[in-house]
Image (cartoon, grey):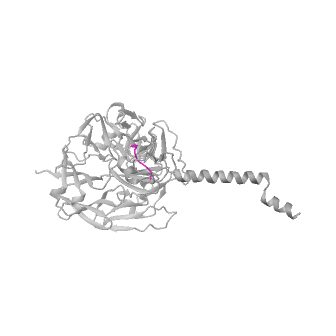
Amino acid sequence: MQTSRESSRKFPQPLDRVAIGLMVVLIVLIGILLLSGDRSAPRVRDFNWQEKQIGSDDRAFLLTFSRPMDQSSVEQNLKIQPELKGKISWAGRRMAYTLDQPAPYGTEFTVSLSDARDRFSKEGSGHGVLKAFSETFKSRDRVFAFVGAEGSEAGRLILYNLTQQDKKVLTPENLAVMDFKAYPGSEKILFSAIERTNPPQSLAEQKLYTVSTGIQINDPAELGDSATPIASASPTQPGQITQILDNRDYQNLKFDLSKDGRVIVVQRLSRRDPNDAGAWLMRDGQAAKPIDNQQTGGDFLITPDGNSIAVSQGQGLAILPLQSQAEQAQANPLDFLPKFGTVLNFSQDGTAAAMVKFNTDYTRSMFLVSQGVQKEILRIPGSIISADFDPNNQVLYCLLTNLLQGNTFQEQPFLAAIDLKGAREGKPMEQTLRPLVLLPNQREIQVDLAPDGKALIFDQTQADDRAKAEVSQSLANSKLWLLPLKGDLSAKTQPEELPFRGLHPRWLP
């Protein structure tokens, strides 16, 4: 019995012998693999802008590799055509390329990478060389909207795709458009309009609507933990009208739309009580609710984060939280700036604002307000009408006026650019203010900066009563102009007249 037990331990069962043999073979194979190294070529596993359409807010793309890469070889061999200057940063196997400027709209780009190698391969060994990579992405089309000014298009909202040379009339003939603002995805436009009647309605009878543009932007997908792209919304036909606010009990006056498209603020006046006037809040498509603060009666602008409004008051400028009566009994100011009369605009990232001060000597000053610092960057005897920050907050494009000599009060408008970097450094106004275009002697000019900062668009009309003409007349002389911007303030460019008539042009994001 003793001998039989010892024999069974020395010679295992057949199944045990097979298992031991397989383990030995696997150990040998693993050893050979470790000694010889991984012979498969590294590759780009994911490119988050692949076949996407990017906007001015998309400032960095990501390349994710299948294995750790030799960073210098990647950086030396990465190519973008047409060129987009930027900076490279790394986090493990992921490389980020951050653009210095937004990509110019209406352009297709190719990102390619070859001859890069992984971190563990030796240069010239022929092993660990990246599999050649080449993919494309596009920037959004150059699209703007305007109010038509002639024939059957007068008073109607019109969309023009400058990249594809395509024009669409979005609103019906029975609505006369007063003002409009585009949503961030460009899929629809918020606008105010009155119905055409005989006799014409008062301009205070406007209602708020949205209209679909038919545009579908294939944005770079946000990736969650599962790395699954979020599905984009299905496209809609252009010209689909939806009323979102009536005028039965309140007149609707000025309105503003937040940058993210989730908040609408409307200035309203009660038809029954003239003392009941103020701002109303519409959030995420919900019904309008009054903001319980009597300080919201002045001109206002929603801050870039969508959480506050800057309101002009008789004693200065107040920054108020956007909260309805149900959210807070009394909205106390977050900040109060007593010396400023109005806010012209905010920078895209919300870190700076351009504000106007009315001086006792009848001049006007423009201040750059940033992180609590208030710096005067312009003082003129004329008017400061509007201002737009370029995407990098380095240039401020303005509509200004000069007072003309004579017995009557006349102003000469002009477009100008302010070098904000020089202004921050304390350079005199003569060195930072660059006039661009002298405009006809009219005050009611609408100017808008393209989201990529590459062009200004503006209108020009000689109508004496512009608001009345928008509703009831055909403005055959109302022109639209495009001024290309090259980024060099010393470069001289001339505006180009567009081949149609219109008012109030605005770029889509």
| Residue 259 visible to an observer of this rendering | no
In percent of width and height, residue 385 lies at 26, 53
Secondary structure predominantly adopted by residues drawn in magenta: loop
How many marks are shown on the rendered structure? 0
Q: Is residue 164 above or below residue 44?
A: above
Q: Residue furthest left?
A: 406
Looking at this view, is 287 or 506 the one in front? 506
Looking at this view, is 178 or 260 the one in front? 260
Q: In the figure, is residue 172 to the left or right of 17?
A: left
Q: Quadrant of the N terminus?
A: bottom right
Q: Is 284 included in the stretch rendered in magenta? A: no
Q: Which residues are magenta?
A: 112-118
In percent of width and height, residue 59 lies at 38, 51
In percent of width and height, residue 211 lies at 45, 41
Which residue lies at the image location 23% right of the left edge and 47% below the top edge? 443
Q: In the figure, is residue 276 to the left or right of 343?
A: right
In percent of width and height, residue 321 lies at 43, 63
| Residue 61 visible to an observer of this rendering | yes
Which residue lies at the image location 37% right of the left edge and 32% below the top edge? 166
Q: Residue furthest front?
A: 3
